[in-house]
């Protein structure tokens, strides 16, 4: 193996994708696939055998999800590069992944070309994001905000305008529904309204 060849492990519970990954890496020059795992626990148990340079992991995994796994992998090697994968470009999940220390984010399914491009970006630039993720991040920074509302209240308003329920908003923001209800009551007070429909109507006027 060449000294500049980077070692990669994949954590993906989709058994059908494992054969795809094998085929992908047969054509890569600078990357060696040294392990594929169905769970984070398996990857952590076998970590010392491979000592990867880059970890590519799905977000949704059994027992320990990919985002929570970042801190476990960082304990093994604080400098390892980690790319997250998920089917949907959910901004809150993307934000949480990078907050936890991810170096990249891709949407599934990941083709041979896209994966190779992402690995090269990690190798030469230290980070990677697929185009749809970039668009999602930019659109969220461009969304309308109201100065008299806090950042969290603006996030909640954005979800309410999209028709999300309190439970969906709570799940998206990783908080309880009672926390969302607390913020909603504050929003109502600031707008001097008493219902969701009144709040949305007043915001449209503003």
Image (spheres, rainbow, N blue to C red):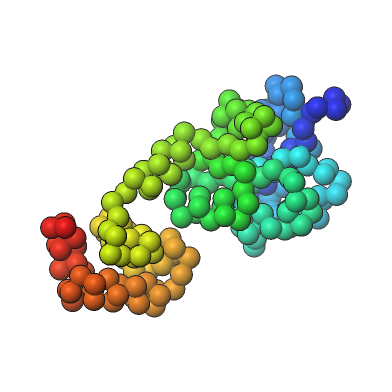
Residue at 38%, 48% (x, y): give it: 140
Measured as percent of width and height from the top left, residue 133 is found at 47, 40
Give left or right: position of 49 versus 60. Answer: right
Residue at 69%, 32% (x, y): give it: 123
Residue at 30%, 75% (x, y): give it: 186
Give left or right: position of 127 versus 41. Answer: left
Measured as percent of width and height from the top left, residue 51 is found at 82, 44
Q: Look at the picture and state if 99 lies above or below 29.
A: below
Q: Is residue 61 visible?
A: no
User: In this orientation, which residue lies closer to the viewer: 134 or 117?
Assistant: 134
The image quarter in which residue 100 lies: bottom right
Quadrant showing the N terminus: top right
Q: How many marks?
A: 0
Give left or right: position of 200 versus 10. Answer: left
Measured as percent of width and height from the top left, residue 58 is found at 60, 48
Q: Is residue 76 visible?
A: yes
User: In this orientation, which residue lies closer to the viewer: 106 or 102?
Assistant: 102
Quadrant showing the C terminus: bottom left
Residue at 68%, 50% (x, y): give it: 38
Q: Look at the picture and state if 42 lies above or below 129.
A: below
The image quarter in which residue 71 lies: bottom right
């Amino acid at each position: 193996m060449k000294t500049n060849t980077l070692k990669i492990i994949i954590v993906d519970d989709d058994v059908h994708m494992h054969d795809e990954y094998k085929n992908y890496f047969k054509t890569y020059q600078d990357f060696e696939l040294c392990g594929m795992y169905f769970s984070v626990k398996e990857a952590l148990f076998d970590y010392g055998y491979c000592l990867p340079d880059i970890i590519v992991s799905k977000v949704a995994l059994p027992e320990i999800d990919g985002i929570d796994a970042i801190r476990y992998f960082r304990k093994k090697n604080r400098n390892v590069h980690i790319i997250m994968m998920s089917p949907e470009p959910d901004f809150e999940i993307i934000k949480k992944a990078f907050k936890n220390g991810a170096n990249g984010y891709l949407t599934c399914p990941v083709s041979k070309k896209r994966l190779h491009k992402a690995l090269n970006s990690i190798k030469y630039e230290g980070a990677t994001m697929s185009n749809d993720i970039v668009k999602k991040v930019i659109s969220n920074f461009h969304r309308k905000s109201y100065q008299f509302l806090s950042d969290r209240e603006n996030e909640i308003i954005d979800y309410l305008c999209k028709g999300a329920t309190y439970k969906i908003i709570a799940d998206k923001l990783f908080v309880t529904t009672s926390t969302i209800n607390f913020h909603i009551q504050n929003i109502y007070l600031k707008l001097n309204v008493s219902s969701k429909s009144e709040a949305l109507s007043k915001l449209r006027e503003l």
